[in-house]
C-alpha cells in the first residue's frame, strides 16, 4: 500500500515535471487570444455592392465556416463595406489569407450535356478537361426526389425527407421524354468540371444557394446516404421554376439520356458538386437528394448547401497583423495579480493548516504545471486560444482547486475531534472527500463538455479551459494529494506532533 | 486520551472548531425574501433600462487612422479620453502590413456631431486630413446565433446536470441546486442591468463561470447533507435538523473556500485593474466577485432551505420541535464521525429514562462522539509472536 502511494506520488510529480520541461525546452506555450496577443486580420470586400444585411449574413457564414475548419474564436465583423476577420494564433499573413478563403457562391444551373458545350462562346476548357470522355458515374446517379410525394397534397408538416419511394414507382407524370435538342445553343452555357474529374456542360445560373434555408441541410441515411434541405419561403419559386423546366425536359434543361429527366447542377466555385435528376416539378418546403452517395460525399454536399447562402461573392483584399485588443499589459497584469492572489491564499492556508498545508503548496504547484502543459498541447491541437477570459477563468479555478484540500482537511479535523488518530483519520477522510470532489467536479465536466459541444466562439474556448482545469484538479487530488497526505499521516513525524492542522491532538 | 470538547466562548472560536449552531432552516425566510427581491429588481431593471450591451453585441463606430511614429495606440486612447469617451468599452488596435500601419479605434455608437468631432481630433493628433481617416459603422462580432447556441447549450446543460444530480443524490436536490444557480445568474444579470455596466463577451464568460462555481459549491454542501441523511436513518431525525446540522458542519469549509476563491479575484480587481492599470480586467473581475459572493450565499440561504422545504414531508414524523441552540450545537459536534447514529434506547445506561420518546432520540442523536466511539475500551492489540 505504502509503496503504491509512493509510486503514485513520485510518478505524478515526475510526469508533470518532465512534460513541463519538455514544453519549456521546445518553447511550446499556449496560443494566446486576440485580446492578449493580437493575430492576423484579413479584410474581405464584396465584389459587387452589397447591402448591410447581406454583409451580416456573410459574416455569420464566414464565422461558421472558420469554426468548422477548426479555426477557433475568430473575430468577424462588418466594418463599412468590408468584412474584417481577425484570427488568433495564426502566424503569418499568407496562412491567414488561405484560411479565410471561404468565399464562394453556390449556383444552381441546369445540366445541358455530358460532354461538350454546343455554345461556342461559352466553352472554356480552361482546366484541360474539355475532350475527356464523360463519365456518367456520379452525376446522373443522384436524383432529387420529392419529399412525401405519396401525398402530394399533404401539408408541409408531413413532408418528411426519407418518406420516399424509388423514382420508378412514380405513378403519375409523363414517362416519355422528348429527345433533347442537344445541339441547341444556350447562351451562357459553360463546361464545368465535376468533383470526380469529369465534365458537365451547364446552362446559366438560375438561382443561388440562397433558395435553401440556411443551415437546414442534413444527412439522411434511410436508403443510402442522402441530403435533405429546406427551401426558404422566397426561394421556393426560384427552385420550382428551375425544377419544373428540368422535370419537363424543357430546352433550357434537357434530358441528357433517354428515360431520364433533366438534372440540376449544384455548382460551387465553378465545380459541379452534384447534379441530381429532378423527379418532381413542384417542391413544397423541402428537397431530398438521394442517390449513390458515400457518407462523406453526402456530408460534403450538405456542407456546401449549408454554406451556400452567400448572397454575394467576397474577395480577400489584404492581410495585416493586428495588435492585442485588451491592451498589451493585460496579460502581465492578470498573471501578476493572479500570482499575488495565489500567494496570499497559500500564506493564509499555511497559517491556518500549518504543516499539512505544505501539501497544498505542492499540490497547487503540480496543478499549475499540469494546467500549463495541457493548455499548451490542447491549444496547439484545437486552435483554441487562451484569451483574457480564459486566464481569469484559470485564476478562478484556483479557488475550486483549493476547495478540494479544504474539504479534505476539514474532514480530517472532524475525525480528529472525534478522537481518531491522524493515521486513522486520513484514509477515511479521503474516501469521503473523494466522493464529494468527484460529484462536484463531474458536474463541472458535464458543463464543460456540453458548452464545448453545443456552443461556438469564445464560449467554447471557455468550456475547454474549464474542462481542462477540472480534469487537472481531479488528477492532482487523486494522484498527488491522496498519497502525500496519507504518507504524511503514517509517518513518524506526524505521530509525534502535538498539533495537527492547527488542532491540539496531544495524547495524554 | 483528552479531547478538547469544550465549547468556545467566542463566535469565531466556535466557527474554527466547528461548534456553530445557526438555525439556517429557521432563517429560511431570508433566502426566500432575498430571492424574490433579486428577481423582482432584475425584471424591473431589465424591463426599464435593459442591459448595456457592448461593442461586440451591438456594433458601433470605427475609425481607421494612419499610424505614424507620433501617433499610435496610446495617442488614440488619449484622444478618446479628451472627448470623454470611456476607454473600457473601446477597442484600439494597431494593424500593420508591409506597406502601411493603421490604428483601428472602435467605440460604441456615438451621436453624429460627436463622431465628427472625434474624427477631427484624430486627424489633428495624427497630423493628417480628415479625408485620410476612414470612418464607418462596425457591426457586432457576437451574432444572435452565438447567443442562441449558448442559450441552447445552457438548457441542455441544466437538464443533464439535473439528471446527474437526481441519480447521484435525488431530484429534490437537483431542483434546489438549479434554483440556487439560477438565482445567482439572475442576480449577476440584475446587477449589471441596474448599474448599467457594460456587457462584453468576457462578462458572459464570467456569468458562465459563476454558474459553474455556484453549482459546485451547492453540491459540496449537498454531499454532506446526503451523508448525514444516511447517518440519521436509524433515528427519527426531522429533515430540517439534518440540514441544519450539515450546514453548520460545512460552515467552516464554505468560509475557507469562499475566502480562497475570492482573494485571487479581489487581487485581480485591485492590483490588476487598479494598480497595474489593465482596465480590461476590471469588469470581468467585478462580475466574478459578485457572482462568487452570490454563489456562496445561495448555497447556504437558498439551496438548502429549499431542499429542507421540499423534503419536509418525506421524513418520519416527530412530535418535537426543531433542535436549536445547545442541542443543535451538540449534534453538530457529535455527528462529525463516520458511521451511523444508532438508536440507543436499547442501552440501559441511558440516563433519560423519564423523558419522553422523542426527547430521548435527540439525546441519542447528539450523543458525544467520544462516548459513542469509545463505549468499550479499545481491544488490546495482540502482541506479535516473535
Image: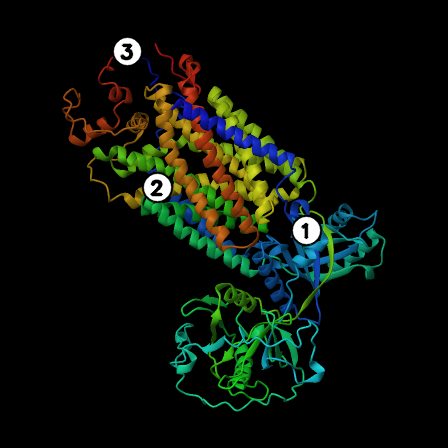
Dot in front, 1 or 2: 1
- Give the SS element for disc 2: helix
Q: Position of residue A223 (x, y in %)?
A: 41, 70
Distance Cα–Cα, label 2 vs label 3: 54 Å
Could you tell me which chain the residue with mark 2 belongs to?
Answer: B
Q: Quadrant of the C terminus of chain A?
A: top left
| In the foreground, B228 or A269 | A269
Which dot, 3 or 1, sits closer to the camera?
Answer: 3
**Other-residue count near label 3 (Cα within 10 Å), few / some / many at <14 / 14–19 / ≥20:** few
Q: Observer-nearest residue: B115 or A424?
A: A424
User: Which residue lies at the image location 62% right of the left edge and 38% below the top edge?
Assistant: A334
Q: Label 2: which residue?
A: B305
Q: Confirm whether circles 3 and 1 share one chain.
A: yes
The location of residue A20, given as percent across then percent down, is 58, 33
Question: With respect to residue B145, does B352 lie above or below?
Answer: above
Question: Mark 3 sits on what residue?
Answer: B384
Distance, label 1 to label 2, CA atoms, is: 44 Å
Q: Which residue is mark 1?
A: B90
> Against B127, is A191 above or below?
below
Amino acid at each position: 500500500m505504502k509503496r503504491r502511494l509512493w509510486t503514485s506520488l513520485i510518478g505524478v510529480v515526475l510526469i508533470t515535471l518532465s512534460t513541463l520541461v519538455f514544453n519549456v525546452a521546445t518553447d511550446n506555450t499556449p496560443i494566446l487570444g486576440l485580446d492578449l496577443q493580437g493575430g492576423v486580420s484579413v479584410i474581405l470586400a464584396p465584389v459587387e455592392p452589397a447591402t448591410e444585411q447581406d454583409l451580416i449574413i456573410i459574416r455569420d457564414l464566414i464565422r461558421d465556416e472558420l469554426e468548422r475548419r477548426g479555426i477557433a474564436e475568430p473575430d468577424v465583423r462588418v466594418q463599412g463595406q468590408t468584412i474584417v476577420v481577425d484570427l488568433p494564433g495564426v502566424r503569418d499573413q499568407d496562412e491567414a489569407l488561405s484560411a479565410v478563403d471561404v468565399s464562394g457562391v453556390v449556383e444552381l444551373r441546369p445540366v445541358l450535356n455530358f460532354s461538350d458545350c454546343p455554345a461556342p462562346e461559352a466553352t472554356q476548357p480552361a482546366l484541360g478537361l474539355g475532350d475527356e470522355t464523360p463519365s456518367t458515374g456520379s452525376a446522373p446517379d443522384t436524383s432529387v426526389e420529392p419529399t412525401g410525394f405519396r401525398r402530394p397534397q399533404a401539408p408541409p408538416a408531413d413532408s418528411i425527407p426519407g418518406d420516399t419511394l424509388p423514382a420508378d414507382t412514380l405513378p403519375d407524370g409523363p414517362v416519355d421524354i422528348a429527345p433533347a435538342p442537344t445541339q441547341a445553343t444556350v447562351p451562357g452555357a459553360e463546361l464545368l468540371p465535376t468533383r470526380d474529374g469529369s465534365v458537365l456542360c451547364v446552362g446559366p445560373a438560375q438561382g443561388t444557394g440562397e433558395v435553401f434555408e440556411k443551415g437546414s441541410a442534413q444527412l439522411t441515411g434511410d436508403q443510402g446516404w442522402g441530403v435533405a434541405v429546406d427551401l426558404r419561403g422566397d426561394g421556393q419559386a426560384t427552385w420550382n421554376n428551375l425544377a419544373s423546366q428540368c422535370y419537363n425536359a424543357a430546352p433550357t434543361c434537357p434530358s441528357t439520356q433517354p428515360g431520364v429527366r433533366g438534372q440540376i447542377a449544384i455548382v460551387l466555385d465553378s465545380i459541379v458538386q452534384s447534379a441530381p435528376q429532378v423527379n418532381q416539378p413542384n417542391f413544397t418546403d423541402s428537397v431530398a437528394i438521394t442517390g449513390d452517395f458515400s457518407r462523406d460525399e453526402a456530408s460534403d454536399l450538405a456542407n456546401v448547401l449549408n454554406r451556400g447562402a452567400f448572397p454575394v461573392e467576397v474577395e480577400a483584399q489584404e492581410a495585416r497583423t493586428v495588435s492585442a485588443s485588451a491592451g498589451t499589459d493585460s496579460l502581465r497584469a492578470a498573471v501578476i495579480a493572479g500570482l499575488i492572489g495565489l500567494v496570499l491564499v497559500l500564506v493564509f492556508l499555511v497559517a491556518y493548516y500549518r504543516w499539512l498545508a505544505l501539501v497544498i503548496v505542492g499540490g497547487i504547484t503540480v496543478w499549475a504545471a499540469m494546467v500549463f502543459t495541457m493548455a499548451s498541447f490542447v491549444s496547439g491541437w484545437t486552435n483554441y486560444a487562451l484569451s483574457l477570459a480564459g486566464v481569469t477563468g484559470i485564476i478562478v479555478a484556483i479557488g475550486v482547486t483549493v476547495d478540494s484540500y479544504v474539504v479534505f482537511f476539514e474532514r480530517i479535523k472532524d475525525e480528529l475531534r472525534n478522537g481518531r488518530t491522524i493515521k486513522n483519520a486520513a484514509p477515511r477522510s479521503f474516501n469521503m472527500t473523494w466522493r464529494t470532489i468527484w460529484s462536484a467536479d463531474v458536474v463541472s465536466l458535464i458543463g464543460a463538455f456540453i458548452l464545448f459541444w453545443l456552443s461556438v466562439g469564445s464560449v467554447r474556448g471557455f468550456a475547454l479551459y474549464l474542462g481542462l482545469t477540472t480534469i487537472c484538479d481531479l488528477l492532482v487530488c487523486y494522484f498527488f494529494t491522496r498519497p502525500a497526505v496519507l504518507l504524511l499521516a503514517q509517518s513518524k513525524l506526524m505521530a509525534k506532533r502535538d498539533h495537527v492542522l492547527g488542532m491540539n491532538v496531544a495524547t495524554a | 486520551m483528552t479531547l478538547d470538547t469544550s465549547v468556545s466562548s467566542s463566535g469565531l472560536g466556535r466557527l474554527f472548531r466547528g461548534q456553530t449552531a445557526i438555525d439556517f432552516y429557521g432563517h429560511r425566510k431570508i433566502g426566500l425574501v432575498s430571492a424574490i427581491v433579486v428577481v423582482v429588481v432584475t425584471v424591473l431593471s431589465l424591463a426599464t433600462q435593459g442591459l448595456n450591451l457592448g461593442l461586440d453585441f451591438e456594433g458601433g463606430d470605427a475609425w481607421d487612422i494612419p499610424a505614424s511614429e507620433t501617433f499610435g495606440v496610446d495617442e488614440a486612447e488619449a484622444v478618446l479620453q479628451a472627448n470623454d469617451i470611456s476607454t473600457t468599452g473601446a477597442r484600439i488596435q494597431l494593424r500593420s502590413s508591409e506597406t502601411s500601419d493603421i490604428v483601428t479605434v472602435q467605440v460604441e455608437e456615438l451621436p453624429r456631431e460627436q463622431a465628427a468631432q472625434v474624427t477631427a481630433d484624430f486627424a489633428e493628433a495624427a497630423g493628417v486630413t480628415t479625408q485620410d481617416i476612414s470612418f464607418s459603422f462596425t457591426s457586432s462580432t457576437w451574432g444572435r446565433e452565438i447567443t442562441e447556441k449558448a442559450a441552447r447549450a445552457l438548457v441542455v446543460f441544466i437538464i443533464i446536470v439535473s439528471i446527474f444530480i437526481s441519480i447521484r443524490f435525488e431530484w429534490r436536490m437537483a431542483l434546489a441546486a438549479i434554483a440556487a444557480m439560477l438565482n445567482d445568474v439572475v442576480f449577476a444579470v440584475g446587477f449589471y442591468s441596474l448599474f448599467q455596466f457594460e456587457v462584453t463577451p468576457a462578462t458572459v464568460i464570467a456569468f458562465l463561470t459563476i454558474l459553474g462555481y455556484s453549482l459546485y459549491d451547492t453540491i459540496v454542501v449537498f454531499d454532506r447533507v446526503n451523508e448525514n441523511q444516511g447517518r440519521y436513518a436509524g433515528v427519527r431525525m426531522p429533515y430540517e435538523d439534518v440540514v441544519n446540522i450539515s450546514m453548520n458542519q460545512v460552515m467552516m469549509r464554505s468560509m475557507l473556500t469562499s475566502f480562497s476563491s475570492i482573494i485571487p479575484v479581489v487581487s485581480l480587481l485591485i492590483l490588476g485593474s487598479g494598480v497595474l492599470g489593465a482596465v480590461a480586467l476590471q469588469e470581468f473581475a467585478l462580475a466574478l466577485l459578485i457572482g462568487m459572493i452570490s454563489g456562496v450565499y445561495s448555497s447556504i440561504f437558498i439551496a438548502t432551505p429549499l431542499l429542507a422545504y421540499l423534503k419536509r414531508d418525506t421524513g418520519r414524523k416527530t412530535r418535537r420541535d426543531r433542535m436549536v441552540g445547545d442541542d443543535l450545537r451538540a449534534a453538530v459536534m457529535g455527528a462529525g464521525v463516520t458511521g451511523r447514529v444508532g438508536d440507543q434506547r436499547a442501552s440501559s445506561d441511558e440516563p433519560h429514562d423519564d423523558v419522553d420518546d422523542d426527547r430521548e432520540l435527540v439525546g441519542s442523536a447528539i450523543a458525544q462522539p467520544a462516548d459513542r466511539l469509545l463505549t468499550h475500551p479499545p481491544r488490546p492489540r495482540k502482541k506479535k509472536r516473535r
